[in-house]
Amino acid sequence: QVQLVDSGGGLVQPGGSLKLSCAASGSIFSINDMGWYRRRPGEQRELVATITVGGNTNYGDSVKGRATISRDNTKNTLLLQMNSLKPEDTATYYCHAVARFGSYDYDYWGQGTQVTVSS
């Protein structure tokens, strides 16, 4: 089992920055890919960014150039730095991890952290 705890959300003005954190615990050595997803009000969950255990990254089109995902495998932490925030970035952000146990991959999610971009 893997447990993920998201933090770092809050209220930020347009153009501002925010850093989200995700602390992983449990069977952390089973974790492979990690990422951030978000759900805006009334919409489906969408990709923000992913990162492999080797550090390869992928970003959603809506955040490219404004977001940086990173992971510290020694501290079991996933980070998301977001800059130039826009009102449309308002959403609940979820940490995600894929962990392999035996021959199967399992998905784990954080509880979510709310980001509100508003003046």
Image (cartoon, rainbow, N blue to C red):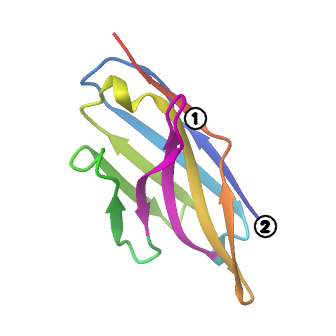
Q: Seen from this angle, which residue lies furthest bottom?
A: 103
Lateral position of residue 98 relative to residue 25, left or right: left
Q: Which residues, given as a range, are shown in magenta?
A: 31-51
From the viewer's perspective, is residue 31 above or below residue 63?
below
- Under circle 1, the secondary element is strand
Residue 79 on image: x %, y %: 45, 50
Residue under numbered circle 2: 1
Q: Identify which amino acid the numbered label 1 is placed on.
A: Thr
Q: Is residue 34 shown in magenta?
A: yes
**Which residue lies at the image location 27% right of the left edge and 36% below the top edge?**
83
Q: Identify which amino acid the numbered label 2 is placed on.
A: Gln
Q: Is residue 8 visible?
A: no
From the viewer's perspective, is residue 16 above or below residue 3?
above
Lateral position of residue 23 relative to residue 80, left or right: right
Residue under numbered circle 1: 113
- Under circle 2, the secondary element is loop
Using the image as rendered, state which of residue 91 and residue 5 is in the foreground. Answer: 91
